[in-house]
Structures are given as C-alpha cells and as structure tokens.
C-alpha cells in the first residue's frame, strides 16, 4: 500500500491563527519533512478558493501555485491535487501549466481531476454553475485535450465546452517522454469522484488512478461499478489503481483519540463557526475509518486493502500545529504495510533489528 499526505493550505481552516507571513514557511517545512521520509509516496493539496465547511475570511492558498512552489523545495516526493476542478481553467492552458510543473519537479507530478462541486465558489468567481451533466461532459473533454497535448505536444479539439486549435505544449511533460510515466497519458491521471454512470465511466476510459469514498461498503460497491465500465470499454480493471482520501485521527489509546477529537471541536469553534456546523464537522471526522488507535487503523486499512484500496491519502487537520499524530501514524501504522526492505528505517527501530 502507498501513502500520501495532504499539506495544510487553509481550505479546511487548517492554518487558522497562524500569521499569513508564516504560511509558506509552515507549508514548505511540512513538505520538506515528507520529502525526507521515503515511507510517504506523495503530498497533496485541494483545488479550492473558499474555505469549508463555510466560506469565511480565512486563508485558502491556490493549488497550482503550491504545486510549482513545492516542486522547487522538494526532490523526491510526488506532487498531486485532489482534485483540480476542470471548470476553473481552460484545459489546454491547464495542460501547459501541468507540463511546466512536471519539468520543474523533474517528473513527479500527479494530475488529480474532477468535475467540481462547490457551488459557492463557482458562482463567486464568475463561472456560473452548470448542471452536473454539463460539468461531467466538460471533464471528459478536458481530459481528452490534456491527454492529446501531453502525448503529442499539440491540441486540436472541437467539443461542446472547449475548442482548441493548434495549441502547443512544448516541452511536453517529462513523464512519458524522458522519465517513466503513464503509458496512456504521460502525466498520471487521477479521476476523482464516484458518480456511477458518468464519472466512473470516464475513469474506466482514461484514468490511471481513481479516488472515491473510503467507507468500506461504498468503496466495494463503486469498485464493482468501475469493473463493469472497464469491461464495457475493453479496459483491464486491475490496470487502474483505486485510492481514497481519509481524515486521520490517531491516538495511543481511546482517551488520546477523544482528546484529538476535542481539539478538533475547539479548533473549529475558535474559527468562529456556528455550533451546529462545528458538531457536524467533528462527526465527519469521528465517523471515518481511520479514527482510533494504531491497531484499529491498521485493521481498517487491512480490510480496505482486501477490497482493492491500495493508495491511502491521509489528512491530519492538526498538522500545522502538532505533528504528534502524523509521527504516530508513521511509526505505528505505515510499517505494517511495507516490507522490511522497503521501509525507510523505522521498521528496524520498531522490530528491534
């Protein structure tokens, strides 16, 4: 199993109380820390511009600016967005931006892409809010344009939502050219979302990775629907890596887990959110599969792995303030999913060898 880690960027109110002048130092420091630990495969950010669970006057740093910045301060870890909203940028321009980041990072970019959902920021930024069907058609067209530009260097396309006439993408991404990458796309493409009729169909056709619900039964159900779509389009189901995002709340014992949940409640309260919003947010953390002691989290991940989930992207809301949860996860959970020769040193510490 591979593991990725979200770096706090403010969208989930995970930089509240930190001076904006210090934000980049915090984010860059956390990125470098992960870069130095080979047990982490990747770092991730969200592609949003207004905070959740409510849009308030708090920081949200822009995703692709961070991709380029992280590329410049790291040297090993892979870089992804979960996920880029197709509706926020012209896909030919996005393909060019991504190709540049892939060059800056020396072939470490992942392209997470989805149709978008956050109506408030769509309308606030002047994008309107097209129907789900229109957004999904735009997603399909955009993925086709990016694939074309990354693999050939040119984009020529006439669709319902996007028209590209001789757009050039040079240099092409390093991945799929001078560096290993996706045979299908160049830069690996992650299709995010679990829409059963259209999103998973697009994933079956184009994705190297999927990213949908990590709740066990739902994950299994979505996987079987993806399998059926793969059969329909003549794609090997096992060619697509299935991932999921997880809120991680870890403690050495149940009391420490409850302390972390209490911290989350206090943190969102301090951000000025209404009590009902705070409680629903805390519940969304508490109800997730990766909440508990290391033993409980390992058990949950073993179950998910048996269902075909082989890439876990984790989010620790307290990471900018307190690294003890991340450290415990690194010391007591990740080693359970790595062979001795793969693990970056901690295996030997834990096992006394």
Image: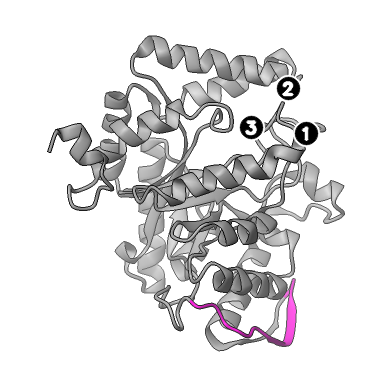
Q: Which residue is mark 3?
A: 14
Whole-angstrom CA distance, mark 3 to mark 2, is: 10 Å
**Which span is picked out in magenta?**
160-174
Whole-angstrom CA distance, mark 3 to mark 1, is: 10 Å
Where's residue 351, x and y in %? 15, 34
**Label 2: element kind:** loop
| Position above or below: 97 against 61 | below
Q: Residues within 10 Å of mark 2 (few under 14, many from 20)?
A: some
Q: Residue at x 14, y 33 (%)?
A: 352
Is residue 194 at least partly visible in the picture? no
Q: Which residue is mark 1?
A: 58
| Quadrant hosting residue 273 | top right
Q: Earlier in the sequence, mark 3 or mark 1?
A: 3
Where's residue 332, x and y in %? 29, 31
Q: Which residue is mark 2?
A: 271
Q: Earlier in the sequence, mark 1 or mark 2?
A: 1
Instruction: Indicate which disc residue 234 carries.
Output: none
């Amino acid at each position: 199993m591979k593991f990725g880690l979200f770096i706090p960027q403010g969208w989930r109110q995970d930089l509240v109380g930190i001076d904006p002048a210090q934000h980049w130092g915090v984010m860059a420091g956390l990125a470098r820390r992960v870069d130095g630990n080979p047990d982490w495969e990747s770092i991730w950010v969200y592609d949003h511009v207004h905070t959740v669970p409510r849009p308030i006057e708090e920081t949200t740093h822009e995703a692709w600016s961070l991709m380029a910045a992280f590329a410049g301060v790291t040297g090993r870890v892979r870089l992804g967005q979960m996920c880029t909203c197709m509706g926020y940028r012209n896909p030919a321009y996005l393909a060019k931006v991504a190709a540049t980041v892939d060059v800056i990072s020396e072939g470490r970019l992942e392209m997470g892409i989805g149709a978008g959902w956050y109506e408030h920021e769509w309308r606030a930024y002047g994008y309107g809010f097209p129907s789900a069907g229109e957004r999904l058609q735009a997603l399909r067209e955009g993925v086709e344009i990016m694939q074309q530009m990354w693999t050939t260097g040119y984009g020529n396309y006439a669709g319902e939502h996007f028209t590209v006439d001789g757009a050039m993408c040079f240099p092409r991404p390093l991945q799929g050219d001078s560096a290993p990458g996706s045979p299908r796309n160049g830069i690996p493409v992650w299709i995010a979302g679990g829409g059963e009729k259209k999103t998973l169909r697009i994933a079956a056709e184009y994705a190297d990775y999927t990213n949908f619900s990590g709740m066990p039964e739902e994950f299994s159900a979505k996987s079987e629907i993806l399998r059926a779509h793969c059969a329909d389009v003549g794609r090997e189901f096992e060619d697509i890596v299935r991932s999921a995002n997880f809120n991680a709340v870890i403690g050495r014992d149940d009391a420490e887990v409850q302390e972390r949940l209490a911290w989350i409640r206090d943190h969102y309260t301090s951000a000025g959110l209404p009590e009902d919003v705070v409680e629903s947010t805390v519940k969304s953390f508490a109800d997730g599969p990766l909440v508990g002691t290391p033993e409980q989290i390992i058990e949950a991940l073993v179950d998910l792995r048996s269902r075909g989930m082989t890439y876990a992207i984790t989010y620790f809301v307290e990471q900018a303030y307190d690294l003890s949860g991340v450290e415990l996860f690194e010391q007591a959970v990740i080693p359970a999913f790595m062979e001795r020769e793969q693990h970056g040193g901690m295996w030997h510490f834990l096992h006394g060898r």
